[in-house]
Image: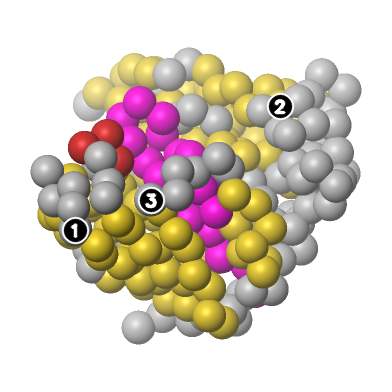
Amino acid sequence: ETGVTQTPRHLVMGMTNKKSLKCEQHLGHNAMYWYKQSAKKPLELMFVYSLEERVENNSVPSRFSPECPNSSHLFLHLHTLQPEDSALYLCASSQASGGYEQYFGPGTRLTVT
Amino acid sequence: GENVEQHPSTLSVQEGDSAVIKCTYSDSASNYFPWYKQELGKRPQLIIDIRSNVGEKKDQRIAVTLNKTAKHFSLHITETQPEDSAVYFCAASGTNAGGTSYGKLTFGQGTILTVHP
């Protein structure tokens, strides 16, 4: 598959569960991003990895833990989430230099029960 | 850091009318301003972008204007069609605390555009 892919597409988890979201890009990019999209705050940047190094963490709670093992893969590890964490989680990638289009994945619809 | 404000939050037009969405940004170092369209249940996709060395860019029915002095940019859609109905996001490139730009975008709050047949 080309572009940016995300798995799973839908996830329902309890507050005590541990799960991981996966993102993979096939575009040769060297920067990857996690966004949270909910009704109240449409597109919130969570984490940025540039050249496999985390360069930004926008005050995200520690129950969200990112991992970027290489420039093509990005993970978001989830544990002890809260119901308010239910949202669409979007991954994106781009070239690391400023001024380039970000390509988005289809997202993971997360529901925390 | 960068702050982007987008207005209006909702916009309803009749088919064939024009639609205008406006955004302001705070970081004078921002030099890249894309617009994304997100249809219901789908991912955001780039529809047009503009760089700081250009004042206007047009692509068929879509145009974007940039006023660097005033730090605002706008999306113009002419001859709107029902398939233009979606959420539109503006964004600005911005820089981090160290003054570098590594591809980060700061997004506006989004505009829900509805085009009535």
Amino acid type at image mark 3: Arg
Give the residue drawn at x 21%, y 37%.
A83
Task: Identify the residue position indicated by label 1 in the image.
Answer: A17
- Which secondary structure, mark 1? loop
**Of A52 and A27, the residue lying toward us:** A52
Amino acid type at image mark 1: Asn
Where residue B60 appears, as percent x and y from the top left, is 55, 46
- Whole-Å distance between the Cαs marked 2 and 1? 40 Å
User: Does the rendering let one see residue A111?
Assistant: no
Q: What secondary structure characterizes most of the magenta part?
A: strand
- Whole-Å distance between the Cαs marked 1 and 3? 11 Å
Is residue B65 in the magenta section?
no
* Residue A73 horizontal side relative to residue A54, left or right: left
Q: Quadrant of the C terminus of chain A?
A: top left
Give the residue drawn at x 27%, y 34%.
A84
Q: How crowded is mark 2: few (under 14 residues within 10 Å), some or many (20 or more)?
A: many
Residue range corresponding to the magenta coloring:
A30-47
Q: Which of marks 2 and 1 is in front?
A: 1
> Residue B25 got which mark?
2
**Of B19 and A110, the residue lying toward us:** A110
- Which secondary structure, mark 3? loop
Where residue A62 appears, as percent x and y from the top left, is 45, 49
